[in-house]
Image (spheres, rainbow, N blue to C red):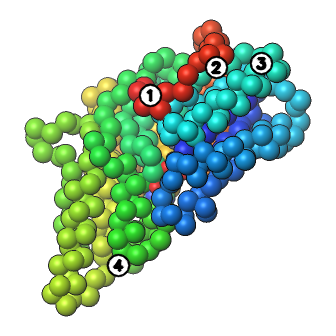
Amino acid sequence: MIVMGIESSCDETGVGIVAWDGERAILLADEVASSQDEQARYGGVVPEVASRAHLEAIVPTMTRAREAAGIDRPDAIAVTIGPGLAGALLVGVAAAKAYALAWDVPLYAVNHLGGHVAVDTLEHGPMPPAVALLVSGGHTHLLGIDALAAPIHEMGTTIDDAAGEAFDKVARLLDLGYPGGPVLDAAARDGDPEAIAFPRGLTGPRDAPYDFSFSGLKTAVARYVEGQVRAGREVSIPDVAASFQEAVADVLTAKAMRAVAERRVDTLVLGGGATANSRIRSLAQERADAAGVQLRVPKPRLCTDNGVMVATLGAHVIGGGAPPSPLTVATDPGMSV
Ligand code: KG4
Ligand code: ZN
């Protein structure tokens, strides 16, 4: 069975195609059109710009994916219905419905977050019960996973900014451009992660154990920079970047390890564009090794938003015997897991 996955929840128009052999998905095509360069002009994702870009890209991206996979049409279509930007989601869902109708193939509505977890099976095989840490410009979630086709348990999320968004905002206040993650990651290489003691949000004994908060950290960086400038002292960008990055990586990985222990699983999966961060990866690896936990990280190309993750989750859902979604299925921008 051949499954096409359509993703349009943020600024990537992704169309992926996988073959399902009854047990696992095999990648056949992975086409992504991104409006990130256009978004960079605005210093962040502008929903209206994203929707228009999806509208232009969706059909050509579907065509490229079918050509790459060497197929005329898939046997089923899976599409992200949420969470994500309302207008952006509508474009992918409208295309998925139209093609499902025209090709007379079943439609499966899937959750974007589950896709980030499912995609790891393409490289690393079947997914045992696990905890997933998803970090991108749009989301920060700790999820409990029993099985890919089963409901996901949301353990915690951010109460304000997403982790990637914090990188983007801090880079902006340091005048380093957009997206901020890669620039800060590079700058941090020459900095001292202990130079500045930035706060670790929501880590007090009475705080929600699995929720995150990054807006206080962003404000702390802004105050620090202002203070330095006011005092006539130089601001060391590498030190600020390294200390900020350390604070983010510390909180994310500490809470993830705690979640792994609570759920008594021995696998931690990372997903989302911000897992490209070198310190998040290395600290997660260090802490996983110390606890005897297996760390699974999809390759960077599959960590960022794409259609393959949607196709892969769709294949598992179909393989699990779930019925198709009606063609009237609605988008769900605030979808929980
Ligand atoms: O998954 P993604 O491509 O798009 C969504 O946000 O859904 O993730 C992009 C986010 C941006 O916020 C970007 O700054 C962040 O991931 N990012 C990074 C790194 N590379 C990308 N954050 C920290 N370190 C990086 N190396
Ligand atoms: Zn995502």
Which is nearer the N-term, disc 2 or disc 1?
Answer: 2
State the CA–CA distance, disc 4 to disc 3: 54 Å
Q: Amino acid at mark 4?
A: Ile
Which is nearer the N-term, disc 2 or disc 3?
Answer: 3
The residue wearing badge 4 is 237
Which is nearer the N-term, disc 4 or disc 3?
Answer: 3
State the CA–CA distance, disc 2 to disc 1: 15 Å
Q: Amino acid at mark 2?
A: Tyr
State the CA–CA distance, disc 4 to disc 1: 38 Å
Q: Amino acid at mark 3?
A: Leu
The image shows a total of numbered marks equal to: 4
The residue that appears at 61% across and 63% down in the rendered structure is: 37
Q: Nearer the viewer, residue 98 or 4?
A: 98
Is residue 256 at least partly visible in the picture?
yes
Vertical arrangement, residue 191 with respect to residue 316, above or below: below
The residue that appears at 37% across and 48% down in the rendered structure is: 162
Mark 2–mark 3 CB contact (< 8 Å): no
Q: Residues within 10 Å of mark 3 (few under 14, many from 20)?
A: few
| Residue 103, horizontal then vertical, whole percent | 83, 20
Mark 2–mark 1 CB contact (< 8 Å): no
The residue wearing badge 2 is 108
| Residue 53, horizontal then vertical, whole percent | 66, 50
Q: Amino acid at mark 1?
A: Met
State the CA–CA distance, disc 1 to disc 3: 25 Å
| Residue 289, horizontal then vertical, whole percent | 38, 46
Is residue 3 at least partly visible in the picture?
no
